Image: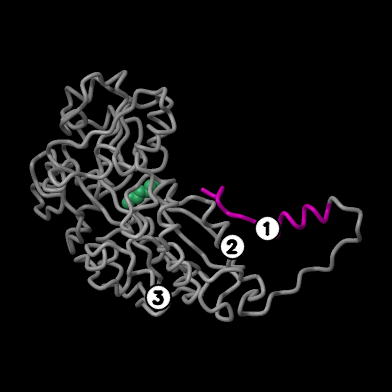
């Protein structure tokens, strides 16, 4: 999704082109060190150390674009913004040698994998005092205790989005997706996340196994579950499943809570719901991190600190509707978001959920199964 890239320079050129003035001289390359004169805020770190631009690679629909404009205006740093749709896509991009990214947003288990592969830079906490705004459980998460490599950005849970005009009994079980008889009732109106760990993980949960199973026999069973209902699946999609529910192209979506809530809140005329299945589901924390190869690591840390500001943290959640790990931001988050049922999973629901974890060597097996499911 490219719509978030803000291009003041292009606007200036357009304006110049419209005026009668002689054509401007070609732009001079800017000196390293950014445009310190443009810094108008305390939130920009040491202006003399800022780069001209910073490259931010995030999940789709995961920030209020206004925040990028604010950072550009306050700090005089252009944010080059691009998006990805799964942890595996992000990893593949980095492993293929993409070296331009300054900030990436891996989930919990992918932080572990990237640390092991030496792909992340250790954060300089002196540049990120706002780490203190994170709730304790995000400052000492098992995948990165003490925020050595990452800072929590948003968290959430996977569940079932549904169109209550079509699925008239609110689903309480993954059987609505994975029991072929039930799924057949919604043939061609089902979307599943385009995500190996999420989709195979949900099938494992349906079977009563761990979302992190490494048992080849259990994984084979999960594959058979997915293959049996695949004829009824319209699409594997992690970017537009909310829109597909709104338009009526689907009636059921295995998807993330914030995305479904956004679809619900923007379309109150539509009778949409979000269900947490009784088998339990995945929860995730997505984290800001700096690749070891980042060209502008200082500016990346300044932007991470900016995103952890309480005001900005609240803007993020008020826009994405995913829960915030930023404790200092909570007073600024809209009450209806904090009180939405299922959006902030209750203790009871949390008892039944699992974090996706690094499954080590079994990752290759998940990948093979996923390729086979997608290919058939
Ligand atoms: C929202 C992205 C949610 C991230 N489009 C899930 N890890």
Task: Point out the image quarter for the C terminus.
Answer: top left
Q: Which residue is mark 2?
A: 72
38 or 276, nearer to the observer? 38
Asked if one can make out residue 249 in the rendered structure from this viewpoint, the answer is: yes
In the image, residue 24 lies at what x, y percent? Answer: 85, 64
Asked if the magenta segment contains residue 16, the reply would be yes
Tell me whether circle 2 and circle 1 mark residues in contact (CB < 8 Å).
Answer: yes
Residue 94: quadrant of the picture: bottom left
Position of residue 283 relative to residue 260, above or below, is: below
Q: Which residue is mark 1?
A: 8
184 or 306, nearer to the observer? 306
Secondary structure beneath label 3: loop
Q: Residue furthest front?
A: 331
Secondary structure beneath label 1: helix
Magenta region, residue range: 1-17
Position of residue 276 relative to residue 249, above or below, is: below
209 or 218, nearer to the observer? 209
Q: Nearer the viewer, mark 2 or mark 3?
A: 2
Q: Nearer the viewer, mark 2 or mark 1?
A: 2
Number of numbered labels in the structure image:
3
* Residue at position x 42%, y 77% in the image: 127
Q: CA distance from mark 3 to mark 1?
A: 29 Å
Drawn side of residue 262 relative to residue 184, left or right: right
Drawn side of residue 354 relative to residue 286, left or right: left
Q: CA distance from mark 2 to mark 1?
A: 10 Å
Sequence-wise, the earlier of marks 2 and 1 is 1
In the image, residue 314 lies at what x, y percent? Answer: 41, 53
Position of residue 157 relative to residue 164, above or below, is: below
Q: CA distance from mark 2 to mark 3?
A: 24 Å
Q: Nearer the viewer, mark 3 or mark 1?
A: 1
């Amino acid at each position: 999704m490219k719509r978030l890239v803000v291009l003041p320079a292009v606007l200036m050129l357009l304006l110049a082109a419209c005026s009668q003035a002689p054509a401007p001289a070609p732009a001079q390359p800017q000196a390293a060190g950014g445009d310190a004169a443009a810094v108008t805020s305390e939130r920009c770190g040491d202006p003399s150390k800022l780069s001209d631009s910073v490259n931010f690679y995030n999940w789709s629909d995961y920030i209020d674009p206004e925040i990028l404009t604010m950072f550009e205006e306050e700090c005089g740093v252009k944010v080059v913004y691009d998006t990805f749709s799964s942890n595996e896509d992000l990893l593949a991009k980095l492993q293929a040698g993409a070296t331009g990214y300054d900030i990436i947003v891996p989930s919990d288990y992918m932080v572990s994998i990237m640390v092991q592969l030496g792909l992340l830079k250790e954060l300089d906490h002196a540049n990120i005092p706002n780490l203190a705004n994170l709730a304790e459980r995000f400052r000492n998460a098992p995948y990165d205790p003490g925020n050595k490599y990452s800072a929590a950005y948003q968290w959430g849970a996977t569940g079932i989005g549904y169109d209550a005009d079509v699925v008239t009994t609110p689903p309480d079980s993954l059987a609505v997706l994975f029991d072929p008889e039930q799924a057949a009732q919604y043939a061609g109106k089902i979307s599943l996340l385009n995500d190996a760990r999420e989709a195979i993980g949900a099938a494992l949960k349906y079977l009563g196994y761990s979302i992190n199973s490494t048992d080849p026999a259990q994984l084979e069973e999960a594959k058979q579950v997915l293959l049996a209902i695949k004829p009824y699946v319209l699409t594997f999609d992690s970017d537009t499943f909310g829109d597909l529910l709104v338009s009526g192209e689907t009636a059921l979506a295995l998807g993330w809570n914030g995305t479904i809530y956004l679809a619900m809140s923007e379309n109150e005329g539509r009778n949409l719901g979000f269900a947490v299945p009784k088998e339990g589901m995945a929860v995730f924390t997505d984290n800001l991190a700096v690749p070891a190869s980042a060209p502008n690591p200082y500016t990346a840390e300044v932007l991470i600190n900016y995103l952890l500001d309480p005001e900005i943290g609240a803007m993020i959640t008020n826009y994405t509707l995913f829960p915030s790990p930023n404790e200092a931001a909570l007073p600024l988050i809209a009450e209806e978001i904090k009180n939405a049922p299922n959006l902030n999973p209750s203790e009871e629901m949390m008892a039944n959920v699992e974090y996706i974890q690094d499954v080590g060597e079994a990752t290759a097996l998940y990948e093979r199964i996923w390729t086979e499911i997608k290919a058939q």
